[in-house]
């Protein structure tokens, strides 16, 4: 009995020591700190971090002797940035419409790991990955990052696109007799019942939310951005099923009518919103829905697409939507519609996400509003306001540091000097 008792005491001591080893406390000194919740700039702050989360933010005073201190007193510190429209687990856009068919699922997994690291090093510590042609490679990437096997941002994932046959979420533009693997057609659905079944399946297989392709796409051959592709009944079937799973639906929608169909059906956010009209802007505000408008990458597509010989039809559709989207963005900002930062990274190289901030300021946002779109606003859209988007007690210690002041020059966010995720400096 004495031996058993001593073994129990020894085990308890070991567990206590393990707990003490895990209970790490560190500090960050921020020369300037952007308080995204209050929308103001603070100076000389001491941030305490316990077990990867912020526990206090206070005017600077020396931390306890011997404490681990990250000295960012020469930098402006912000919460880690959030991109609400990325495609990490996929190939990047190219001139070849069949490019997705040239890569195995193993290729996509390895590419996704590289894209995830590039994104994290650019200061984006959280992303919403809104679809991959190879179903569930995004789920695998998210899980690998969470397990610590892969270095990357926190991810919320869609699993696959829900799209009509031949629609904007399919691999299109190939010869009619070219077979597309079943894993690339996992979310293809026709009619409300099939949409409902596919929605349920995606949640069962690990999706965090649902992404619908409500209109044609700029980058999908044979589809038109202005044309609705899903009915209000189909979209509502997904919205209702997502609600039963305590989640939500976002809709890819370029065209004005498709945007309004999706909003009436109850989606939480609209991706792109390129051809949104005044009625759509008013409806988005009335519904409390979010717009995620990728107003940078039209310039990238135009420049690189013409240089590299992208299909003429894609370049034409990009020209038709780029300026209209930017004007719609400006109107939405002025109207007070909720807007979250989202870039469509993957159309252009991952890691260049911050290039969009300049465009958001150019088309009507203040620098603080642009920063909040990628912090507090994005966190609210994700339903993660208690976890990310602010440097505040209870939030993950996801921080970035930049040498210049992004409130004076928003382009400073394109030159991130240091990145911390969960209390660990990764750059």
Image: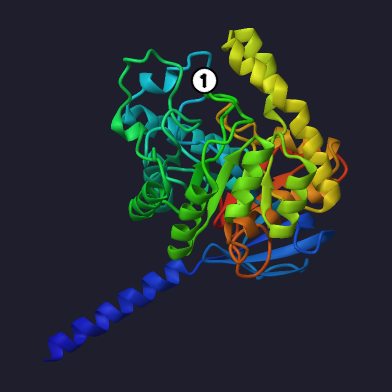
Residue at position x 73%, y 64% in the image: 46
User: Image height check: is 357 above or below 108?
Assistant: below
User: Image height check: is 183 above or below 146?
Assistant: above
The residue tagged 1 is: 222
Query: Does the image show residue 342?
Result: no
In this rendering, would 103 be left or right of 395? left
On the image, the x and y values in percent for residue 105 come to: 33, 31
User: Image height check: is 226 above or below 373?
Assistant: above
On the image, the x and y values in percent for residue 61 come to: 77, 69
Q: Pointer 1: residues within 10 angstroms few (<14), some, or many (20+)?
A: some
Numbered label tally: 1
On the image, the x and y values in percent for residue 246 come to: 47, 64
Query: Does the image show residue 158?
Result: yes
On the image, the x and y values in percent for residue 228 come to: 58, 36
The C terminus, quarter of image: top right
Q: Decide which of 192, 71 is in the foreground and name it.
A: 192
Residue at position x 42%, y 17% in the image: 98
- Looking at the rendered structure, the secondary structure element under dot 1 is loop
Q: Decide which of 255, 325 is in the foreground and name it.
A: 255
Asked which colour scheme the image uses, the reply is rainbow
């Amino acid at each position: 009995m004495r031996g058993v008792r001593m073994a129990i005491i020894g085990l308890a001591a070991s567990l206590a020591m393990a707990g003490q080893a895990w209970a790490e406390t560190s500090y960050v000194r921020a020369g300037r700190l952007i308080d995204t919740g209050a929308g103001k700039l603070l100076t000389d702050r001491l941030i305490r971090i316990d077990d990867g989360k912020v526990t206090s933010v206070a005017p600077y005073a020396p931390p306890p002797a011997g404490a681990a201190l990250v000295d960012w007193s020469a930098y402006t510190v912000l919460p880690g940035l959030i991109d609400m429209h990325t495609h990490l687990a996929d190939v990047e856009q190219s001139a070849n419409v069949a490019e997705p068919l040239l890569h195995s699922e193993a290729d996509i997994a390895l590419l996704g790991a590289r894209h995830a690291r590039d994104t994290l090093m650019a200061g984006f510590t959280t992303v919403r990955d809104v679809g991959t042609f190879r179903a569930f490679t995004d789920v695998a990437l998210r899980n690998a990052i969470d397990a610590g096997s892969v270095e990357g941002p926190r991810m919320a994932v869609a699993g696959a696109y829900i799209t009509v046959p031949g629609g904007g979420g399919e691999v299109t533009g190939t010869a009619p007799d070219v077979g597309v693997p079943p894993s690339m057609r996992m979310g293809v659905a026709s009619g409300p019942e099939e949409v409902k079944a596919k929605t349920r399946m995606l949640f069962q297989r690990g999706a965090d939310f649902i992404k619908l392709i409500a209109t044609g796409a700029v980058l999908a051959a044979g589809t038109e951005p202005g044309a609705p592709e899903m009915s209000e009944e189909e979209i509502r079937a997904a919205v209702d099923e997502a609600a039963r799973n305590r989640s939500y639906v976002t809709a890819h929608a370029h065209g004005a009518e498709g945007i309004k169909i999706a909003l009436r059906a109850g989606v939480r956010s609209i991706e792109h919103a390129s051809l949104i009209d005044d009625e759509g802007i008013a409806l988005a505000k009335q519904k409390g829905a979010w717009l995620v408008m990728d107003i940078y990458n039209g310039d990238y597509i135009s420049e690189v697409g013409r240089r590299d010989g992208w299909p003429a039809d894609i370049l034409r559709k990009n020209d038709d939507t780029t300026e209209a989207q930017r004007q719609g963005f400006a109107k939405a900002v002025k109207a007070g519609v909720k807007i979250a930062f989202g870039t469509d990274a993957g159309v252009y190289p991952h890691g260049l996400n911050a290039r969009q901030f300049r465009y958001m300021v150019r088309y009507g946002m203040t620098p603080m509003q642009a920063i909040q779109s990628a912090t507090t606003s994005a966190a609210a859209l994700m339903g993660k306001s208690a976890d990310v988007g602010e440097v505040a007690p209870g939030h993950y210690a996801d921080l970035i540091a930049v040498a210049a002041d992004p409130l004076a020059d928003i382009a400073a966010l394109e030159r991130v000097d240091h990145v911390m995720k969960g209390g660990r400096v990764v750059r």
